[in-house]
Amino acid sequence: MNSTIIIAAIVGALVLFALYLYNTLISARLRVSEAFSQIDVQLKRRTDLIPNLIETVKGYAKHEKSTFEKVTELRTSLMQAKTPEKKSEVNNMLTDALKSIFAVAEGYPQLRASENFKELQEELEDTENKIAYSRQFYNSNVLDYNTKLQIFPNVIFARILNFKPAQFFGTAEEERKPVKVTF
């Protein structure tokens, strides 16, 4: 009788532990999904601002057609990207293309003085800051989730329950290089 109670208590404790672990992993995975959706919101905001920026700059820099086409193509690619890896890759290319737009604007003092352009530039800068924060938040959640998947005894249950590690939202190699300032 005593051994039956002890075995039942051990089995009950293991079941409760497994339920706790499962719920913890599910919560962590949902936080990763929610954090990724926040990146999506900011990327959508940026893609909504880009046509206005392009139209504003186009009026001043008609000969920069290839730059505008590249930004438009990348905007479309970003809107169609589904995975964190693809969104990260296209986002990095779009960031570089937007730098080209602002470089074009540098050559047009009347454009830089335009209130519409200034407002769009401020909106994009604000959005870029929000994207950077969202990426940090997402990557923190991915780190937490992936850590939970790899520590013992979670690793055993995670494999049995088929939990997969999440991918970090990375940056392009070019973005890691220091900015060169010349006077």
Image (cartoon, grey):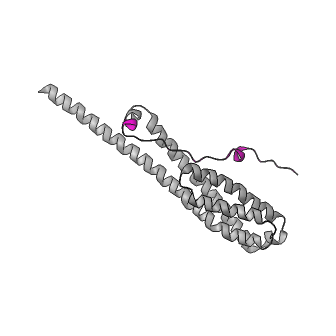
Q: Residue at x 70, y 47 (%)?
A: 175
The x, y position of residue 69, in whole percent, is: 72, 64
Q: Residue at x 74, y 70 (%)?
A: 117
Magenta stretch in the rendered image: 157-182
Q: Quadrant of residue 91?
A: bottom right
Q: Quadrant of residue 63?
A: bottom right
Q: Is residue 178 magenta?
A: yes
**In front of the other: 142 or 60:** 60
- State the predominant SS element of the stretch in magenta: loop
Q: Residue at x 64, y 57 (%)?
A: 129
The x, y position of residue 96, in whole percent, is: 71, 55
> Is 46 on the left-hand or right-hand side of 83?
right
> Is 141 on the left-hand or right-hand side of 124?
left
Quarter of the figure with the N terminus: top left
The x, y position of residue 72, in whole percent, is: 67, 64
Q: Relative to 34, is 15 above or below?
A: above
Most distant residue in the top direction: 3
